[in-house]
Structures are given as C-alpha cells and as structure tokens.
Image: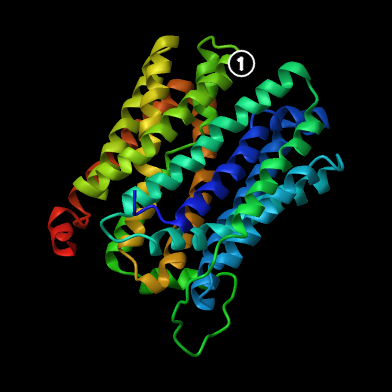
Amino acid sequence: MKYITKTIWILSIVSFFTDTASEMLYPVMPIYLKSIGFSIALIGILEGVAEATAGLSKGYFGKLSDNSGKRVPFVQIGYGLSALSKPMMAFFAYPLWIFFVRTIDRLGKGIRTGARDAILSDEATQQTKGKIFGFHRSMDTFGAVTGPLLALLYLYFYPEDYITLFYIAFIPGLFSIFASSFLKDKRINIPEPKKPISFFSFLTYWKVSPIKYRKVVIGLLVFTLFNSSDVFLLLKAKQAGLDDISVIGVYIFYNLIFALFAFPIGIMADKIGLKKMFIFGLSLFAIVYFGMGFSNHIYTFIALFFLYGIYGAATEGISKAWISNISDKKDTATAIGTFAGFQSICTMFASSLAGLIWFTYGASWTFLVSGFATILVILYFTISVKYNDPDKNSSKIAH
C-alpha cells in the first residue's frame, strides 16, 4: 500500500482516537443530559446549536486554510478542542456550561474538516482518491466501533457512572493530540495579495466554483435533506422490539461493517469511477429505507443495518473524494468546507422533517419518503451530472 503515506497514516490514527473518544460518549450522552435536568426539547436545541456551529464554521475555516496556505495548525487545533471538551463536559452541570462545551467540541470539527480533507486530497492522485479517503474513513469508523464497546464494558462494571466516563474519554483524546504533533505542513503557493476574509466569505466560492462542482453538490445536498439522523433508524429498531443493549449492539454492528468495507470500496471506486460507486451507495440507502418502512422483523433489521454499513462506506469518503477531484487544488479546503457546511445545515432540516413526518403520519412514512426522494436523486446524478471520474483510461496515461 505505497499510496498510504506517513501523513495519511498519522491523520487516520488521529481520527481513530478522536472518534473512539466521541463515540464512547454517544450512547450515554442523552442519558447523562437527562440526569442533570435537560428536557428532550433542550437536548434538541443543544444539538441544533452545536451542529449549526460546526456547519457554518467548516466553510470559513476551509477558506482560511486555503488563504493562509497552512493545513496542519487547523487540524491540530480542531482535534485539540474536541479532545479537551470531553472532560470539560463533566466539570459543571449548568445548562449554559454544557452549551459552551458542546459548542467547543463542534467548533473543533468545523476548524479541522476542510484542512484535513485537503491534506488527504494533496496526498493522493486523481486515480487514488477513493483509496485514500476510504482508508481514512475506515480508520475513523473503527473508532466508532471501539468507543461504544469500551463504554458498554465500563458501564457493565460501573453502572450509571457517567461522570468518570467523560474523564476516561479524554485518554484517547490525548493520544489524538499527541499523534497530530507528528504532522508537517507542505509548502503551498498562495497568490498575493491575501485579503482578509469574513465569516461568510466562503459563500462567494459558490459563484466562482466549477459548474461540475455545483451540479454535484446540489445533488448531494438534496439527498442530505432526506437523510435524517441515524437515531431514527435506531428508534425504529427499538419500536420493533429490540432492547436497549441490542439497539446499541446494532449501532456497533453498522459501524463495524462500515469500517470493514470503506477501504476495499474505495479501491473499487478508483477502478469503476467515484460517481458510479456513489450511485451504488444511494441505491443501497433506498433499499434500506424501503425495508425499514415495510418491515418490522428483527432479523430483517440486522440485514438492513448490514446494507446500511456498506452504503456509508460507498458514500461518505467517496463524496469528498469526488468533490476534491472537481475543484481547483488551491481551493480544496474551501470546496470541501463549503459543502460540509451546507451539509450540516441540511442535516438539521432533514431530522426536523423526519420527526414531523413520523409524528404526523407514522414511522413507516418517514422511511418511505426518504426512499422515494433518494430514487429521484439517483436519476438526477444519472441524467444531469455528466462528470466522468478518472478511470482506467486516465490511469493508463498516469502510468
């Protein structure tokens, strides 16, 4: 695997430890917040504010990274803030403090996302983007398997000791900070003069971005509007009769499948084309959501979560690899950050829409509407987006 460079290994290890820390707290966060007096409505507001912070800041810091010609400081600060937020969550139980700390965590994600993905893009060629982004997503998602398993193991021996778990989560966070110290910036040529940028100046990138970029991102964002939080899938599994431990187990199973398939799917995507692989992923998503809408059988759910893991592997890293291939190298962080920012905002609307449909028409319609919308997005990409991925022909030229 000569295309997996030292820098990619370091970034992937950093992501693994960070996700281990974050996902260690994922199963207990709602329980902990309710135990200190948060209502369901307040938890929703907290998550909305946190995600809005992450979403809006991704584009700004991506643009700032491109303008400054630096990547590593954004990555180190971003991962550092996320690591430090874990023990801070347990210091005080005041709502204002919890809002502050949760926002710090999401701000860290906003600071690092564009710069990190730009580093991954710079370390790859157009013929290896799928492999590189797939490998990184695989390592990142293995953290999403390790974290909940460690949390379940700890809570088995020390039930309801949530505070200590926040401190324990700081340990993999420290490992991520240490690993990030080995990253080194490559010299990037920046056109002069450099103009100061405002928080929303990244939005101007949309006007000057390549037409292919806009076409692809429009399709991705429309899909995001109907791709609600995974919480709804877990709620459906719970509704079908799974107990709490089984629901968490299904979530871990999904992440394990995602992690195992992300890298080989990335390799395959480089051979058949990123667009084709992404459409394949969307097809699996539609199958899963139609299945969730029509079925209430526990064993069917296990099969659907298996397919859902493959869907994640075929879309998350692939979408960023695709975007990096259709944007100018000097604007990579801005292009990915702008997309990720809009995506975060659309995700908030998606969950609100899903919740509204669930409340008004029932759980099944939530999944059926998303399934039908995904079919329309597949048709859009098939008919409207004529972008041809680097494939065997371009690979021959490269060799």
Q: Is residue 45 visible?
A: no
The residue drawn where x is 39% and y is 50% is 133
Q: Would residue 311 be visible to someone looking at this image?
A: yes
Is 316 or 228 nearer to us in this picture? 316
Relative to 33, 272 lies left or right: left
Tally the numbered discs. Answer: 1
Viewer-nearest residue: 218 or 365: 218
Q: How is the image coloured?
A: rainbow
Quadrant in which the C terminus is drawn: bottom left
Position in image of residue 229 (x %, y %): 52, 35
x 42%, y 39%: residue: 226
Q: Is residue 354 above or below residue 75?
A: above
Residue drawn at (52%, 50%) of the image: 344
* Image side of residue 294 versus residue 53, left or right: left
The x, y position of residue 207, in whole percent, is: 38, 72
Q: Secondary structure at mark 1?
A: helix
**Residue 387 at what x, y percent from top left?**
21, 58
User: Against 53, is 241 above or below?
Assistant: above
Q: How many neighbours does mark 1 have within 10 angstroms: few (below 14), some (14-19), or many (20 or more)?
A: few
Residue carrying label 1: 245
Q: Residue at x 55, y 37 (%)?
A: 143
Image height of 369 relative to 338, above or below: above
The residue most toward the bottom is: 193
User: Horizontal placement of 344 versus 38: left or right?
Assistant: left
The amino acid on which the numbered mark 1 sits, given as a three-letter code, is Ile
Quadrant location of residue 210? bottom left
Image coords of residue 227 (percent x, y): 44, 38
